[in-house]
Image (tube, helix red, strand yellow):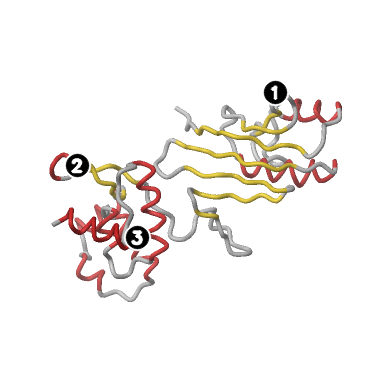
């Protein structure tokens, strides 16, 4: 079964399309393409019904951002055509949400509520390092469900069978960012993760925002709100 992503919003052109331009975009979205020349087999963007802009083709199952760059760089710049607007997406995986914003052909990708900043020349992807491990809701005392990072089965097996244990790993001289990622991979709850001394504020904020998308009543973490910290500690006592 294919992965499903839902989209909302559209990008608008800064002028009316010529008949030949509209015909080209219709054809581009209706035929198969060579992956060596195009970002995917099918174009991820189609004309809106009134032909004043572009909207995502949710059936394309392809590279939406890459296709948008292709259209802007290879087509619209040649036509002296500009687009602007905002399209939000929601995927099946926890945390797979974000917005694609375009202003006068300048494209910005935002994961969740955080603008993506990829260092020049980097090919590490769109999410800041370390990437967030998917979140699941885990049963807690009193029937409460709490958001918890999904543990990695390979990491679990390595810890179970050795040769290293958590005490040995704690003594290693490794970057805090890698310890953050390791804490996610072994399945920390969001609240427990936030208490770790090596976890950075920005990582907690990212995790907290994603958690509240899944569980709206989940309180703000203390890195974000001092009053929320006091409330959280009082509830946990």
Residue 15's image quarter? top right
Q: Nearer the viewer, residue 25 or 217?
A: 217
Report the residue at 64% width, 37% height from top: 40
Q: Which mark is residue 49?
A: 1
C-alpha separation, residue under disc 3 versus residue under disc 2: 22 Å
Left or right of residue 98: residue 203: left
The C terminus - image quarter: bottom left
Residue 52's image quarter? top right
Residue assigned mark 3: 225
| Other-residue count near label 3 (Cα within 10 Å), few / some / many at <14 / 14–19 / ≥20 | few
Q: Residue furthest front?
A: 227
C-alpha separation, residue under disc 2 versus residue under disc 1: 46 Å
Residue assigned mark 2: 144
Left or right of residue 15: residue 232: left
| Other-residue count near label 2 (Cα within 10 Å), few / some / many at <14 / 14–19 / ≥20 | few
Left or right of residue 226: residue 38: right
């Amino acid at each position: 079964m294919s992965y499903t992503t839902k989209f909302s919003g559209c990008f608008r052109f800064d002028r009316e399309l010529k008949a030949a331009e509209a015909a080209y975009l219709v054809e581009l979205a209706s035929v198969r393409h060579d992956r060596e020349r195009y970002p995917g087999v099918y174009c991820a963007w189609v004309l809106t019904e009134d032909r004043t802009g572009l909207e995502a083709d949710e059936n394309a199952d392809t590279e939406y951002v890459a296709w948008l760059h292709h259209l802007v760089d290879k087509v619209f710049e040649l036509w002296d055509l500009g687009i602007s607007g905002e399209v939000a997406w929601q995927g099946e995986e926890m945390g797979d949400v974000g917005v694609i914003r375009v202003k006068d052909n300048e494209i910005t990708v935002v994961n969740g509520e955080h603008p993506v900043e990829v260092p020049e020349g980097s090919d590490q992807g769109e999410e800041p390092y370390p990437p967030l491990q998917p979140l699941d809701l885990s049963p807690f005392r009193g029937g409460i469900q709490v958001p918890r990072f999904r543990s990695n089965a390979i990491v679990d097996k390595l810890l179970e069978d050795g040769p290293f244990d958590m005490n040995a790993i704690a003594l290693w001289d490794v970057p805090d960012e890698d310890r953050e990622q390791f804490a996610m991979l072994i399945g920390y709850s969001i609240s427990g993760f936030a208490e770790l001394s090596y976890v950075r504020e920005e990582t907690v904020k990212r995790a907290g925002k994603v958690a509240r998308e899944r569980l709206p009543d989940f309180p703000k973490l203390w890195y974000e709100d001092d009053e929320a910290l006091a409330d959280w500690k009082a509830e946990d006592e």
